[in-house]
Amino acid sequence: MTEMNLSPGEIEDFAVREHRSLWLDAWRRLKANRTAIIGLIVVLIFLLSATIAHFFWEYEPKIDLDYSAKLLPPNLRVSEQSLKIHPFGTDKLGRDIFRRTVHGGWNSLRVGLVAVSISLVVGGILGLLAGFFESIEMYFWESMALMAFLGLALGALPAWIANQIFQVFLFCALGIISVIVDKKNLSKHIRRYLFAGLGLLAGGLSGLLVAPLVGLVCGILGLGIGLLLAIPVGGKIFSNIVMRIMDIILAFPSYLLAIAIVAFLGPGLEKGMLAIGFVGIPIYARLARSAVLSVSQKEYVLASQAVGESHGRMLFRHIVPNILSPIIVQATMGLANAILSAAALGFLGLGAIPPEPEWGSMLGDSYKYLSSGAWWAVLFPGLAIMLSVLGFNLLGDGLRDALDPKLRI
Amino acid sequence: MGRYIIRRLLSVIPTLIGVTLIIFLFQRIIPGDPAVAMLGERATEENVARIREQFGLDRPAFLDRDALAEGDLGGFFDSQYIRYFNRLIRLDLGESIHSRIPISESLKERFPATIELSLLSMFIALLIGIPVGIASASRRNSALDGITMVGSLVGVSMPIFWLGIMEIMLFAVLLKWLPAGARLSTGIEIKTITGLLLFDSLITGNFPGFVDALQHITLPAVALATIPTAIITRMTRSSMLDVLQEDYIRTATAKGLSERIVLFRHALKNAFLPVITVIGIQAGILLAGAVLTETIFSWPGIGKWVYDAILGRDYPIVQSVTLLIALIFLMVNLLVDLSYAFLDPRISYD
């Protein structure tokens, strides 16, 4: 018999593989990807420099003005022409462009981050719920809550017309009744007649208290709402309603819609964040919904359903962790887009209110005196936009490969 | 398939109504008094009254419940939105606040300029994007592929307004190779037939006019084409890579067909569907990108018009152009969806 000489270390290597989590695996793959690491480094440089500058490098845009030093080309040494070092040159008000670019990063990146957070949270939750209830049947109380909400929403119209708040609660009750009655078997026709009649009474009678014509209009509306509420809607219809609304927002090219919204709201960083966040909602809603739809057919979700786990637990223990990777990738790429849109807004004069520094508005200012040949005033802010956007795009690309090796082609 | 087409056509209607609703809501989010916002503090009484009339600002937004309570059913529906919607159905876009020129008239004048710019940009994007995408997919992981991937990422990350400025700086200001701004040099005239100068000058045999128009359109078209080129390249590449892994490609290669025939006859045909979708989406992005590109190059299309309107708070113009672009975007996407029904026999509808 041959003797096997194995050192303890080798045995360990064979027997127990080192435990690696999915995220650690992804990190290893990301580290091996050179372009992704370059992206990560670029992103970190921009984030760090902007944050550090904001907190530790004082800058008062309102008093930053020096006509003696206007439109100086970049210089790295003190000379007779310029008494201070301006690595990126100065603009037409004699402001140091390097300083403004670094400080502008705080505003530009912040718009991107806040906007993506808005669209991610709102769109993600909408898509999650839509996808979940489209594929998994609702509990009794869940469909009751949905119908009560539908009653509230639909009842708001006749209630507003008649100026009677209590009507809303009548229709809300109608929605709840519709779910409760569902348990007893009534034929569809009888249900429809019953609920249409109830709706007609709820809207019409209370409307009559105000004026005959109001009674008529509210009665007709009530009849329609009653018909809609007669059959409790399932998750599929909820999902359809949400996705229809998303389709309407998607009918606009996204950053044109953002520009239009801010054009009407008036310029300002906060308004830009809101507008860019709003137009991004449908992307995340669609993505989250389709991811949930594919995940909820997996065995582990069926198993947890069979065991009788609560919907909240299913959602947060089994579904959310498994749809995170496409959403993280989209959010990283979305950041790149949001920064681009924010810069476009700033360029059109709809971003930060001057003299506040922001990359897009710096470009928009300096392109007006392009003919003076001051290339440095447009080169550096634009380069900052491009590099930060490129950084997020490279990182997002790498993350996609790292988080989902199956997608790799 | 007929039923699918009808269903898809009908599904546009609620979206269209939603789009008009969103565009109407724009005028509701103006902070303060819209008439004052549009005309400024020192507006004359007469002008304010005119704006109030045009927008129906003295009417409620959607429905008038007070009129209903008084028994006036007609007054109930006489609201800002319903007036707006009625005018839209009659194709009446209103008039500019400041110049008082009807918007549809200016639109007729300006729209061809934007269409010409967008079409040429799309042409450039397709001309570069598809061949480069095919080449880099067929030589995967080669140097060409690497350059394509990095280049297309840079293209996607490019702020096109910055690219436009740098183009002007380099080619117009420093090198003086190409003109920047306007569609034609002064003194050159082209007889208007379609409004697309390149096309018109060719048809009328106006060769100097054609060259001049081409010189003027080159810089803005290249700037506008950047992002679509990058996206179409990436999409063509990844779609080709997908298809090249299919069994029928292996069969075709095993049969002894030349690489070119496999690539173009077997792979490209099947890889084209996702590319068409992307082209449809890019059409909308091109029109929206025109706002920035036209602003920089003083291109007299609808984009520059919107920019001026935003500065002048001429809101009806912003509303109309947004609506127009959304409509075109919807139509192009509809066509893309319908073309699927014809192009892909694997998908069954109904």
Image (cartoon, coloured by chain):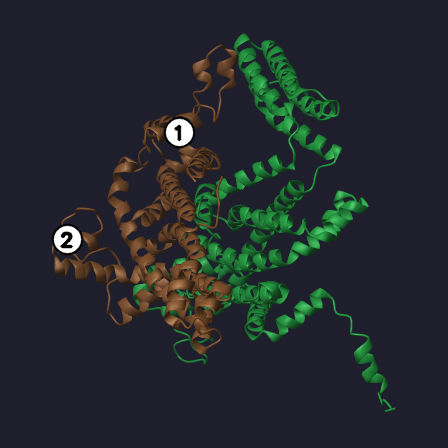
Specify the subunit that label 1 lies on. B
Quarter placement of the N terminus of chain B:
top left
Determine the colour of chain A. green
Question: Is B47 situated left or right of A326 in this image?
Answer: left
Q: Is residue A60 above or below residue B52?
A: below
Q: Looking at the picture, tell me which residue is in the foreground, A349 or A32.
A: A32
Q: Residue furthest front?
A: B255
Q: Which mark is residue A350?
A: none
User: In the picture provided, is B196 more to the left or to the right than A310?
Assistant: left
Within 10 angstroms of label 2, few (less than 14), some, or many (20 or more) residues?
Answer: few
SS category of the residue bearing label 2: helix
* Residue A87 visible in the displayed image: no
Measure the C-alpha gap from mark 2 to mark 1: 40 Å
| Residue B44, image quadrant | top left
Nearer to the camera, B207 or B157: B207
Q: Position of residue B92 (x, y in %)?
A: 32, 31
Judging by the rendered image, the residue that carries numbered circle 2 is B203
Q: Residue at x 50, y 42 (%)?
A: A247
The answer to whether marks 2 and 1 sit on the same chain is yes
Relative image position of residue A352 (x, y in whole percent): 49, 53
| Tag 1: amino acid | Tyr
Question: Which tag, 2 or 1, sits closer to the chain's start?
Answer: 1
Residue that label 1 marks: B84
User: What type is the residue that disc 2 sits on?
Assistant: Ile
Q: Which chain is home to disc 2? A: B
Asked whether the beta carbons under mark 2 and mark 1 sit within 8 Å of each other, the answer is no
**Residue A274: x %, y % from top left:** 54, 47
Element at label 1: helix
Query: In this picture, is A371 found above or below A127?
Result: below
Instruction: Answer above or below: position of B179 versus B41.
Output: below
Q: Which chain is brown?
A: B
Q: Which residue occupies the foreground of this view, A352 or A166?
A: A166
